[in-house]
Amino acid sequence: PRLMPRGRPAKIAPVEDIEREFEAAARRGAVFAALGEADYPVRLSRIDAAPPLIALCGHLPALQRSTVAIVGSRNASAAGLAFAERLTRGLAEAGFVIVSGLARGIDVRAHKTSRDSGTVAVLAGGLDRIYPAEHQPLLESLLARGAAVSEMPFGWEARGRDFPRRNR
């Protein structure tokens, strides 16, 4: 069997599972990008153990612009949130797309502040399983000028161990 970057044999999914993924992507308005394809974010392709396949939705040109990640505490102080907003606004005005994880606290403030200039939400679950669920409206609102990315299959509920993977 062909080896994946981490040395594990690749598993070939049953045709039925693949068809379900394509159907779910079509319902969500998402596409798939494989490592090395034009829609695959260049910076993501350069990390160790880059995901071989990702699901994308939204304004895909945002994924090819210069990006800056802003992440932080889920229980941020008022001062921390204000600082994150100022930093995000300045970077967005300088032309950067803001990347964050759609989590509570700093992440949400960064996404809300950069929604009109472009922001990318990197999800720990599938594109149809937003965590936390109350951020679904925010995600929908940022897709006009930004995007969402996930390496997890549709239907995947984020678990604690998925967040470090998302963060890489």
Image: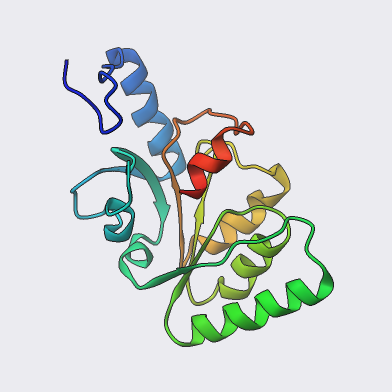
Residue 50 in percent (x, y) is at 32, 44
Q: Is residue 73 above or below residue 20?
A: below
Dividing the picture into quadrants, the one containing residue 115 is: bottom right
Q: Is residue 32 above or below residue 156?
A: below
Residue in the picture at 53% in, 28% down: 155
Residue in the picture at 54% in, 42% down: 164
Please state which of residues 98 and 129 is positioned toward the viewer in this rendering: 98
Residue in the picture at 30% in, 12% down: 14
Residue 135 in percent (x, y) is at 68, 51
Residue 133 in percent (x, y) is at 69, 42
Residue 37 in percent (x, y) is at 19, 49
Quadrant of the rendering where the N terminus is positioned: top left
**How is the protein colored in the picture?**
rainbow
Q: Is residue 77 above or below residue 95?
A: above
Please state which of residues 97 and 50 is positioned toward the viewer in this rendering: 50
Please state which of residues 139 and 86 is positioned toward the viewer in this rendering: 86
Residue in the picture at 32% in, 41% down: 49
Q: Is residue 128 left or right of residue 33?
A: right
- The image shows a total of numbered marks equal to 0
Q: Is residue 125 above or below residue 69?
A: above
Q: In the image as oriented, which residue stretches furthest toward the right?
A: 78
Q: Is residue 115 left or right of residue 12?
A: right
